[in-house]
Amino acid sequence: MEREHEEGDARRGLLIAGLIVAMLFAALDNTIVGTAMPRIVGELGGLEVMTWLTTAYMLTSTTIVPIAGKLADLLGRKAVYVTGLLVFIIGSALCGTSQTIYQLIGYRALQGIGGGVMMPMAMIIVGDMFTGAQRAKWQGVFGALFGLSSIVGPQIGGWIVDSLNWRWVFYINLPVGILATILISLGLKSHRAKGPVKIDIPGMITMIIGVVSLLLALTFGGKDYPWSSWQILSLFALSVVFLIAFAVIETKASEPIFPLFLFKNKTFALLNGIGFLMSLGMFGAIMFVPLFMQGIIGISAAASGTVMTPMMITMILTSIVGGRFVRKIGVRTQIIIGMACMAIGFWLLSTMSIHTGKLTAMSYMCVLGVGIGLVMPTVTIALQESFPKSELGVVTSSSQFFRQIGGTFGMTILGAIMNQRSTDLLTQQMVPLLQKLPPQAHGMVEQFESLIQTNPQGVYSLLLNPDAMQKIPAAMLQRVVPILKSTLVDSLHSVFLYGLVFVLLGAFLSPLLNSIKLSDKKEKSVS
């Protein structure tokens, strides 16, 4: 008996080590690749499709999340997790061998399938291994790994690119991934659901087409194509048709990929609604704060990145502390406090002006980080505590799925608000000034007016490019720069205030949660 207990402890130690290694290297991948992108495009070309290096990964990783969660319930955690790890490793190896940008995009999509399996699996396994009270601590630790990756990822990526070459950004995943696979294979027991396994293939197909169409429309609408273009409208229509078909199929499937009856559960609907709204606002802030710092304060791109670091550090610390604190104050209270902190953070961001300093901006981001750290891991813990083990996979993966979809919606909606507000303000304040310029400047005026209508954020790139500013006559620069800065500040105020609205909606949902107590029941076996 004692020997079995020791073997169980050893197996658990291997598993926890494997989970930490796997989660860290998956979370690091995107930040490292982002740093290497200029070097990749410099060698392979394809500047016009560079964004697909991120988009391809995002499409596949987001879409696979709910499928991975359901398959984990049906086929067992070990089979699904190890398969995801192997797909990620193979995708990474292929990325490193790419000879064209299009090959790399395809391999990034494959890598995204592996990444989309890996991310929810760690949280699912933590839900299996620990009681509710213990889960709170470990979910905080694992959540902190994501924040850590955003801090150290760019530095690691820069070092790899400078010291070796961009291909090692992908090759570095191979030894780390193999180590994680070995540890998890040794630590995780093989287990699957009893009886015949029925996989909902029609549900998978309709969900994939519906979600990918929606994500593509949100990604390219208002940027590559106008919102009213046939391309974007067709994608939205395709998404609606297939998501309706998916909903119909799921009501009839014996083992639905995403059981729609879960939405009848008040706790499920509220927690995923809070996660969606939190992500919707959060990603908008993260995306636009560096633009404020570079365009208004005038600091370098590298220095503007340091503004985000205090938020990430605060989020890491709060995730860990909140994981221990939630047992004392309760899930509902902690989520309310966290959403309130996020709301205060957004309001503070909306008060920033041309005279706001770097330290002030950092302090505002810290307030936002406290809120994110309190809410993000708690939502997953509460969902796991509210459902039986047989539904743990699909319920846990739903939390990540709705957060990722919320982030995509947030970047799209707040980006559209930014563009519309910028177009209106620049048309009112910049166009009259441009029209007063002498006839010889007519070509530049037409270019500026076109840019204001089609890509207003491109106009602000002048503030981010000292070389371009030097080419403009000093007398004109003195009149143009104040207008650019004031319109940028006003546009960002609108973005942060809309972000505040989304977070407040999430905050209003929080008190509606039932009281959720974290259990001290005997730990569940890992399957």
Image (cartoon, helix red, strand yellow):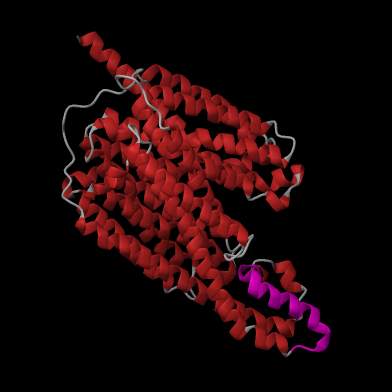
Q: Residue at x 21, y 37 (%)?
A: 133
Quarter holding the N terminus is top left
Locate residue 448 relative to residue 22 in the image: left or right.
right
- Position in image of residue 287 (x %, y %): 51, 59
Q: Quadrant of residue 185?
A: top left
The residue lying toward the viewer, choosing from 376 and 344, is: 376
Residue 122 vs 503, above or below: the answer is above
State the residue lying farthest toward the right.
440
**Relative to the observer, which residue lies in front, 523 or 405?**
405
Determine whether 324 is above or below 124 in the image. Answer: below
Can residue 488 be seen here? The reply is no
- Which residue is depicted at the point 70% across and 68% down? 466
Which image quadrant is residue 443 in? bottom right
Q: Position of residue 454 (x, y in %)?
A: 65, 70
Q: Judge whether residue 269 is colored magenta.
A: no
Asked whether 452 falls inside the magenta stretch, the response is yes
Horizontal side, residue 291 vs residue 124: left or right: right
Foreground of the two, 424 or 322: 424
Looking at the image, which residue is at 64% across and 38% down?
A: 106
Q: Does the image show residue 237?
A: yes
Q: Which residues are magenta?
A: 437-458
- Image coordinates for residue 436, horizontal then vertical, percent: 72, 90
Q: Position of residue 450 (x, y in %)?
A: 70, 74
- The quadrant of the picture occupied by the C terminus is top left
Q: Write the residue at 29% across / 34% down.
A: 392
Tell me the chief SS of the magenta region.
helix
Q: Is residue 506 left or right of residue 481?
A: left
Numbered label tally: 0
